[in-house]
Image (spheres, grey):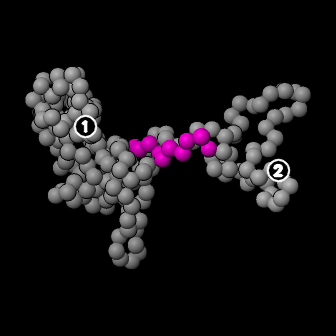
Amino acid sequence: MEFLVEKIGMSRTIGKPSIPVTLVKVKTAKVCEVLEGGKALVAYHQGKNLNKSIAGQQKKYNLDKEYNKFATLEVSNTEAGDLDLSSLDSAKKAKVSFNTKGRGYSGVMKRWNFQGGPGAHGSRFHRAPGSIGNREWPGRVQPGKKMSGHYGNEKVTVQNEIISFDKEHNILVLKGSIPGFNGAFGKLKIVG
């Protein structure tokens, strides 16, 4: 089963030993249409955007105005209605997919952990990458050379142990950390 989740943040359990945990909120969603192979078209709320195509889908599936986004998920529902969250009670492990924090255009020290040069005066080699090429042959920079560039904002999937699930507030407690910033939006899949 798959669920749409929002990262709340990290905390820890009280006790010995104390375990680092990440809290995620399972988004309330409605199953619009059950498709083949255990998948379904699901509507959920995110932001305030609305256009004619979204309004048409809301009218077609008789949805409230707040349901303005749609996704295809693996669900346990056999008919349209509220998304069934009962499988989260007995789940032990989950795969969580989020985008990592975006860091924009980064230098080699931040992106690849290069050591950099001496910090003293007159060095002229502080945070620069240094030599990047070879001799006359091959006379070019080799493919895959670690250089500065765009870093972060890429999809990462991690597997975490589920510690507990609060039905009343739809909050799931996962052991360890997950990628992304607090408030990030991602997908959770039960694997055990």
Q: Earlier in the sequence, mark 2 or mark 1?
A: 1
Residue labelled with disc 1: 48
Please indicate whether residue 176 sits to the left or right of residue 130 in the image.
left
Mark 2 neighbour class, 10 Å CA radius: few under 14, some 14 to 19, many 20 or more: few
Is 100 included in the stretch rendered in magenta?
A: yes
Q: Residue at x 31, y 54 (%)?
A: 24
Where does the image place residue 110, in percent across and percent down from the top left?
63, 50
Please indicate whether residue 175 sits to the left or right of residue 144 in the image.
left
Mark 1 neighbour class, 10 Å CA radius: few under 14, some 14 to 19, many 20 or more: few
Residue labelled with disc 2: 124
The vertical placement of 10 against 31, above or below, is below
Where does the image place residue 105, in percent across and percent down from the top left?
59, 40
Q: Quadrant of the N terminus?
A: top left
Is 104 included in the stretch rendered in magenta?
A: yes
Query: Is residue 148 in sight in this rendering?
Result: yes
Span shown in magenta: 97-106
Q: Residue at x 41, y 75 (%)?
A: 17
